[in-house]
Amino acid sequence: MIDNMNDSVIKDIPERYMRIKVATEALRFNMASDLYTGSLLKTLAASKPAGRLLELGTGTGLATAWIVAGMDNNSSLITVENNELLIEVARRNISDNRVEFVLTDGYEWIKNYNGEKFDFIFADAMPGKYDLFDETISLLKFGGLYIIDDMLPQPNWPVGHDKKVADFLSRLEQKPELIITKMSWSTGLVVAVKK
Ligand SMILES: C[S@@+](CC[C@H](N)C(=O)[O-])C[C@H]1O[C@@H](n2cnc3c(N)ncnc32)[C@H](O)[C@@H]1O
């Protein structure tokens, strides 16, 4: 074993992440993205200088903290969440003028958005992933990244969710404009690029 290939040692955890984690545990929010996903998001965010980034499902901002840590000064992030209590934790801890926090319903936001397309979308809510998938992919620029997690069985999955995931993966694989890589790593990740 090559010791420094041990991926369970994640050294570059953003300071904001640590603060948000404490608040997240106090709220008993159990849908948070894990450290592996965070680390990958940071790396991929850094691949988009002056990028326009979108996160659907801010939660308390754990993944947001990683994304922001990878962004350069000219990048911007819109992050959408419908739960005020959760997004306020993110807003309080990530005070950064590159980030726009949007408290609204993700379904309405996707349907109504008519601004510039995105270089990077982390879809971590029902809208943008299982629902309004085609609409969300249409918000990506060519060469843009579409990233999802939680594709492997998780303890908080409701009954029947495995079928939903399998159907969604088939849909992803059949979308001709996407090139995808599946990773049975972390909670089960997929990275897709729009061609
Ligand atoms: C898996 S969690 C997101 C976790 C977050 N990315 C993190 O790193 O901790 C999904 C989030 O989507 C939010 N959500 C669910 N339905 C939504 C909707 N219709 N519009 C906007 N947000 C929604 C939930 O409140 C929850 O915070």
Image (cartoon, rainbow, N blue to C red):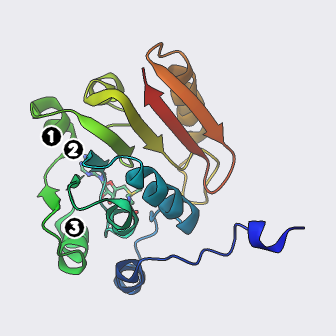
Q: Residue at label 3? A: 87
Residue found at x 31% / y 49%:
49
Q: Quadrant of residue 167?
A: top right
Q: Nearer the viewer, residue 41 or 2?
A: 2
Quarter in which the N terminus is drawn: bottom right
Q: CA distance from mark 3 to mark 1?
A: 15 Å
Quarter in which the C terminus is drawn: top left
Characterize the local packing of mark 3: few (<14), some (14-19) or many (20 or more) Cα atoms within 10 angstroms: many
Q: Residue at label 2? A: 106
* Residue 115 position within the rendered picture, expressed as x and y whole percent measured from the top left: 10, 34
Label 2: which secondary element: helix
Label 3 or label 1, whichever comes before in sequence order: 3
Label 2 or label 3, whichever comes before in sequence order: 3
Which amino acid is tagged 3? Ile
Which amino acid is tagged 1? Trp
Q: Residue at label 1? A: 109
Residue 9 placement, left or right of 151: right
Residues at discs 1 and 2 in contact (Cβ within 8 Å): yes
Characterize the local packing of mark 2: few (<14), some (14-19) or many (20 or more) Cα atoms within 10 angstroms: many
* Residue 105 position within the rendered picture, expressed as x and y whole percent measured from the top left: 17, 47
Does the rendering let one see residue 126? no
Ligand 1 contact, mark 2 (Cβ < 8 Å): yes
Ligand 1 contact, mark 1 (Cβ < 8 Å): yes
Residue 147 placement, left or right of 58: right
Residue 70 placement, left or right of 5: left
* Residue 40 position within the rendered picture, expressed as x and y whole percent measured from the top left: 52, 56
Label 1: which secondary element: helix
Characterize the local packing of mark 1: few (<14), some (14-19) or many (20 or more) Cα atoms within 10 angstroms: some
